[in-house]
Image (spheres, rainbow, N blue to C red):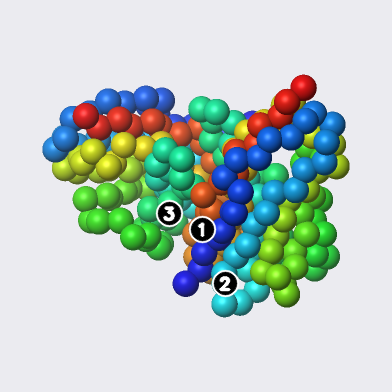
Amino acid sequence: AQSVTQPDIHITVSEGASLELRCNYSYGATPYLFWYVQSPGQGLQLLLKYFSGDTLVQGIKGFEAEFKRSQSSFNLRKPSVHWSDAAEYFCAVGAYNTDKLIFGTGTRLQVFP
Amino acid sequence: ETGVTQSPTHLIKTRGQQVTLRCSSQSGHNTVSWYQQALGQGPQFIFQYYREEENGRGNFPPRFSGLQFPNYSSELNVNALELDDSALYLCASSGTAVTDTQYFGPGTRLTVL
């Protein structure tokens, strides 16, 4: 069965520090992978997505993610975090040909000045 | 600006009642998916509608039902509400291709007392 694991429930970083949010997936074929961000009381905004090709994907707001098939991972990174990045981050895998997204439980990012 | 709107923003119901939530898709999108996000969890796929027909369903009982209209707007109906139905309900619209991005609305917060 397809699943997504986000091992870190809560991460705290200082503004300006680098960030890496972990995501591991279980899927029988080449997955479609996504990172979404959710601010308090808001819906989900797509940061980036991977379908095929270059395994390093660039997204909005300075985020990037790297697909590593050997590790079944799709970690999200940002070189310098801003206070406005504080939010909940969700990794998701797309089930082929159904468009159904399977989400992880999320990682809450807190940014200290 | 995703263009996906949902109504109402908040709703309070009691056990056993019925509720209808509404979603207006982004212009040009013909696919709508509904997700339930319990507090502290990632969104869970409920079902998807494509051209007014159900096109995939998650692990939710039949008392969760939906409709999609010719203008591609959609409704989620939940009968015989239970306390565990309290959650944020998100709708997402997308185009036809499985690689099309799902754009999420801000959600409807349902509280069941």
- Left or right? Give the position of A77 relative to A39: right
Q: Name the residue under label 1.
A: A102
Asked if both marks, 1 and 2, belong to the same chain, the answer given is: yes
CA–CA distance in space, label 2 to label 3: 17 Å
CA–CA distance in space, label 1 to label 3: 7 Å
Q: Which of A95 and B94 is in front in this view?
A: A95
- Left or right? Give the position of A47 relative to B102: right
Q: In this view, does A60 lie above or below A84?
A: below
Chain letter of disc 3? B
| Mark 1 secondary-structure assignment | strand
The outermost residue toward the left is: B16
Q: In this view, does B58 lie above or below A15?
A: below
CA–CA distance in space, label 1 to label 2: 11 Å
Q: Which of B56 and A3 is in front in this view?
A: A3
Q: Mark 2 points at which residue?
A: A27
| Mark 2 secondary-structure assignment | loop
Amino acid residing under circle 3:
Phe
- Quadrant in which the C terminus of chain A appears: top right
The outermost residue toward the bottom is: A28
